[in-house]
Amino acid sequence: MHTPRRCSSRCPRRPPSCTCPDGLKQSDWTLGSWNREDLGNGLYRGTSLFDGRDTYVRLDAQPSSLLVDYWVGLDPARLLRVNSARVVSGPAVGHAEGTCLVTLTKWRTPVQSDEDWARACAVFDTEVHMIKGRLELGF
């Protein structure tokens, strides 16, 4: 059994302004799926900055919970729900008004190598800081 990876950051915006449920804006901070294009029906394709391959993503947003599940894969017919983002209002957990907490969660697949998992964890640590920076800059 593998423990999921979680990364969190306090961001300077209220939750609705978070870019997590926007499949195209997500391209600004997802290193594994850069330069996204909307393929329709909630499916997006981007390019991995690591190996140049196409990465497909389908978002399952639950706006009332400020939760987004990401179904990801190299084949649009075989996506796995391996990533989630959750946004919590800062005051709900004792932080300042006008802030939110963004938490990314990644699940390891049974076939993922130790090297791929280590890279994925490092990427998530970076991406949560990229989200924070973009929110601070008003992206």
Image (cartoon, rainbow, N blue to C red):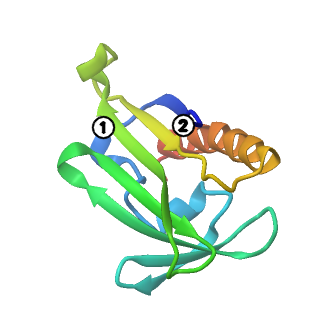
Classify 10 Å Cα crowding around label 1: few (below 14), some (14-19), many (20 and above).
some
Q: Name the element at disc 1.
A: loop
At which x and y percent is residue 75? 59, 80
Mark before the other along the chain sequence, 2 or 1: 2
Q: Residue furthest top?
A: 94
**Residue depicted at 50% across the width and 30% down the height:** 8
- Can you tell which mark lies on residue 102? none
Name the residue type under label 2: Pro
Location of residue 10 with respect to 5 vertically, above or below: above
Q: Residue at x 72, y 39 (%)?
A: 122
Figure disc tally: 2
In this rendering, would 69 be left or right of 108? Answer: left
* Residue 119 image position (x, y, % from top left): 76, 46
Image quarter (top left, top right, bottom left or bottom right) of the N terminus:
top right
Q: Nearer the viewer, mark 2 or mark 1?
A: 2
Looking at the image, the residue that sits furthest to the left is: 64
Residue 4: which disc?
2
Tell me where residue 115 appears, x and y as whole percent: 82, 46
- Res 23 → quadrant: bottom left
Q: CA distance from mark 2 to mark 1?
A: 26 Å
SS class, disc 2: loop
Q: Which mark is residue 14?
A: 1
In the rendered view, does 110 fall on the left or right side of 106? right
Q: Amino acid type of disc 1?
A: Arg
| Dot 2 crowding, Cα within 10 Å, few <14, some 14–19, many 20+ | few
Where is residue 2 drawn, in percent x and y? 59, 37
Q: Is residue 94 left or right of residue 38?
A: left
Query: Residue at 31% of width from left, 47% of height from top?
Result: 67
Q: Nearer the viewer, residue 2 or 50?
A: 2
Q: Is residue 130 above or below residue 55?
A: above
